[in-house]
Amino acid sequence: MLKVAVIGMGSWGQALVESVQGRSEHLIFTAGHTRTAAKAAEFCGRLNIRPVASYEEILADREIDAVLLATPNSQHSQQVVQAAAAGKHVFCEKPFTLDAQAARVAIDAARKAGIVLGVGFNRRFHPAIVELRNRVKAGRFGVIASIMAELTATSAFYRPADSWRWSAVEEPAGAMAGIGVHLVDAMIDLVGPVSEVHCTSVKRAEGQGEDTTSLLLKFANGVTGLAFGSIAATRNFRLAVYGAKAFAEVLTPTMDTFRFLPAVEGNASHLAEVPQPETLEYRGVNTARLELEQFAQCVQAGRQYPIPLEEVLHGVCVFEAAVKSAASGLPVAVETMDRS
């Protein structure tokens, strides 16, 4: 049983812990540290988590095998470096870092220390996304023309005014850090590296910062992409792939539905009767539990986390380009991955 300490016990840090605590044979959370311990006192008592005064004290504890970082985004890189030096495996929430250089430093430290480093792109583990990925990799779509993604929530209306998430330093370009990185990661996973991004970000809720972000992407292989994320819009999720041989999409806020529609052949296919799509339903999936159990199993088996760190780094490069594009109003070329 992997013994893990949670660093950062805000709403998402608590949700991650609760997804597995007492439910998993692979890991257990035994300790935790957060900036405002009083706010997490009830949570720690209820889930039998020992409050610890500092991150350094947790890293010095030989009984702890790994740390989960659910901390402000700007802290991730240094915290990964510290954990690697202490020989602790790391599960880090997204965004991994806010710039490519910080990502390289953290990844290099993890590789040199030989620790498992996982990043919290939980949607990759949903069976509907796995089904979509498998069909893309099997060539079922033929030539892919475009990929589209959207993810929305109304969290901007409920976020406390003193939340670090309102900081333009911690979460630049509106919904990019909280939502956009998930969409970018899904696209990289399915169709490969991004070569250029054009990002716009605006404020639609009554909160303190921008909350709605749109991306137009070009991929190195010629595919185009559209992504829309907002924390000021009714909760939804959709990921769609448009190919010459087929179209498919994953739908609903919890990604319950997978739809696959083969192309109608012939020059007048637009006049032909459209066949009924193949539909698969996946209900009650907890992707937070799936990703954390996968992390624990990787540590136990001595293998790396299944999301390649090269793709994590490239996602940070896209994030950094999107932030620059939102600021300038112009398309920005994405740094290549050959320096990883």
Image (tube, rainbow, N blue to C red):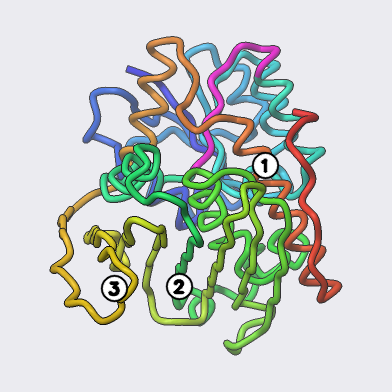
Secondary element at tag 3: helix
Disc number at residue 152? Answer: 2
In terms of sequence position, does the residue under pointer 2 or pointer 1 come before the other? 2
Q: Disc 3 designates what residue?
A: 269
Q: Residues within 10 Å of mark 3 (few under 14, many from 20)?
A: few
Q: Give the residues drawn in magenta, as a range.
A: 111-120
Residue 175, how many percent across, how many down? 60, 69
Label 3 vs 2, first from the N-terminus? 2
Q: Secondary structure at mark 1?
A: helix
Gap in Å between the C-alphas at discs 2 and 1?
A: 23 Å
Q: Is residue 266 left or right of residue 280?
A: right
> x, y (%) of residue 329?
81, 76
**Which residue is rendered at x = 55% and y = 46% of the image?**
188
Look at the image and tell me in which quarter the N terminus lies: top left
**Residue at the spot x=64%, y=31% of the render?**
310
Q: Relative to residue 133, is residue 340 drawn left or right?
A: right
> For this view, does 168 lie left or right of residue 156?
right
Q: Is residue 285 above or below residue 29?
A: below
Q: Which residue is mark 1?
A: 314
| Residue 331 on image: x %, y % | 79, 67
Identified by mark 1, the residue type is His
> Which quarter of the picture shows residue 112?
top right
Residue type indicated by callout 3 = Ser
Determine if residue 217 is in view.
Answer: yes
- In the image, residue 16 sits, relative to residue 163, either above or below, namely above
Residues at circles 2 and 1 in contact by the CB criterion of under 8 Å: no
Mark before the other along the chain sequence, 3 or 1: 3
